Image: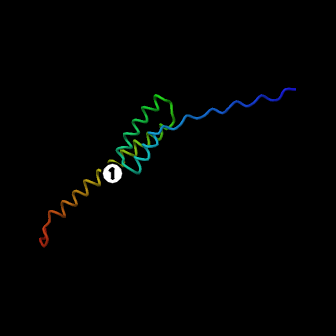
Amino acid sequence: MPGQPPYPPHPYAAPFNTYAILALVFGVMVFPPLGIYFGKKAKNQIAQTGERGAELATAGVVVGWIFTILYGLMFVVWCGVAAVFLSSEPGVQP
């Protein structure tokens, strides 16, 4: 009496794209413009290779843009505050 045939092997999932992971890490924690760059590069590679991580790449681009804009606004405000403090002479009231 023959036994059951063996189960077919499980298909392996495609690996995550390294640039997609880097896009999210750089976009959130390190340097947001690099998150934008790595996210766009990851999307191009994912389209060619079929790797996973399109969502990570998109999140890296979006978060990278948000943090880049916020850092830019903070820099402009900081420059304005510094200009106000440096332009006033001590002892002179406006």
Which quadrant would residue 64 be assigned to in this image? top left
At 84% from the left and 26% from the top, the residue drawn is: 2
Q: Is residue 91 left or right of residue 59?
A: left
Q: Residue at x 43, y 36 (%)?
A: 42
Quadrant containing the N terminus is: top right
From the top left corner, tell me how far across and down residue 69 is, in percent: 32, 48
Secondary structure found at label 1 = helix
Q: Which residue is more in the foreground, 5 or 88? A: 5
Is 7 above or below relative to 21? above
Q: Which residue is identified by label 1?
A: 70
Count of marks overlaid on the render: 1
Q: Is residue 79 above or below residue 39?
A: below
Quadrant of the drawing holding the C terminus: bottom left
In the image, 44: left or right of 3?
left
30 or 76: which is nearer to us?
30
Q: Position of residue 17 (x, y in %)?
A: 48, 37
What is the residue that sits farthest to the right in this orientation? Answer: 1
Q: Which residue occupies 66% across, 33% down?
A: 10
**Residue 61 percent coordinates (x, y):** 40, 41
